[in-house]
Image: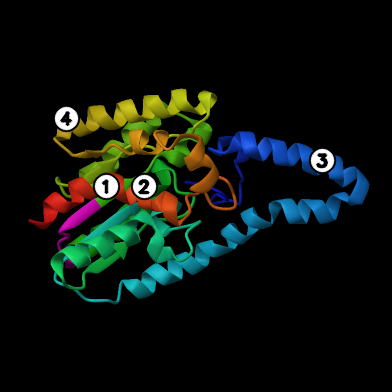
Amino acid sequence: MLAVGYAGRVFPGHSPALGVKALALSATATLAKRFGQARLFEIANRPLMELAEMQPVTAAWWRERRKQPGEFHYLALGDSTAQGIGASVPGRSYVGQLADRIEAQLDAPIAVTNLGVSGAPSDLCVRDQLPRAAKVLAKRQADLVTLAIGANDIAQWNPRAFHRNLNTILDALPSETILAELPSFHLPKNERKVHEANGIVHVIAEARHLSVVPLYAATKARGINGILTEFAGDAFHPNDRGYEVWADAFWPLVRTRLT
């Protein structure tokens, strides 16, 4: 998912907590007239800026994590949610939490290659992550591959392009890849697009006999409590608890790969 994209673009209109954010912005506008707009803008946007600054930090964290050896190899592709933007540490992303659970189940350390890139829509996953995945898979087979992509496509939604890109990605990945739905955005104007995207996910998955993580239902079910307590300061990315909801949705399918 996206706070600040490849070109530094911000899409606050796609925040799951938009209603809360809108009230905050309205109050900020009123206070700006009284206390100074520049200072209040800095305060209001501090969470977003802080999370944007996390992106090179999380990427470096995962590069270091890749050095850990293990007989079991987990390869992940995706966006900022794979990296863990919004989590207290990158290892609390859904990828990190799944890795922890796998290690506990196997009682052994595992190798993790996380190719997720913050802000990546499906076309940039094709462009940037697939070449890297090909190099990784040429050197070592992956025992588990997960793909969660598409949330950043919603900002400029093109169903044909998403369908094409998703097929291209899956053509290059192992046939047992676990594919995730898009999460709920909790906003009516975006939910229609999300439903369309998830329809494409399921059509492609069924044709390829792939397992699909029911991420939409898992996040939608959290309701207002989830909106208020399971998002980071930018009101868009999950926090540690939010990523736990994601990991819980993935886990039943991931666990079957360990037996």
Q: Which residue does the image show at 20% across and 66% down from the upper left?
A: 104
Q: Which residue is mark 1?
A: 250
Q: What element does badge 4 sit on?
A: helix
Q: Is residue 229 left or right of residue 30?
A: left
Q: Are marks 2 and 3 in contact (CB under 8 Å)?
A: no
Looking at the image, tell me whether mark 2 or mark 1 is earlier in sequence order: 2
Amino acid, disc 4: Ala
Marking on residue 29: 3
The circle on residue 207 is 4
Is 88 above or below relative to 211? below
Find numbered disc 2 in the image and state the secondary structure of the residue it sits on.
helix
Q: Secondary structure at mark 1?
A: helix
Magenta segment range? 138-145
Residue depicted at 13% across the width and 35% down the height: 209
The amino acid type found where label 1 is placed reads: Phe
Q: Residue 35 location, x and y as percent?
A: 90, 51
Q: Residue furthest right?
A: 34
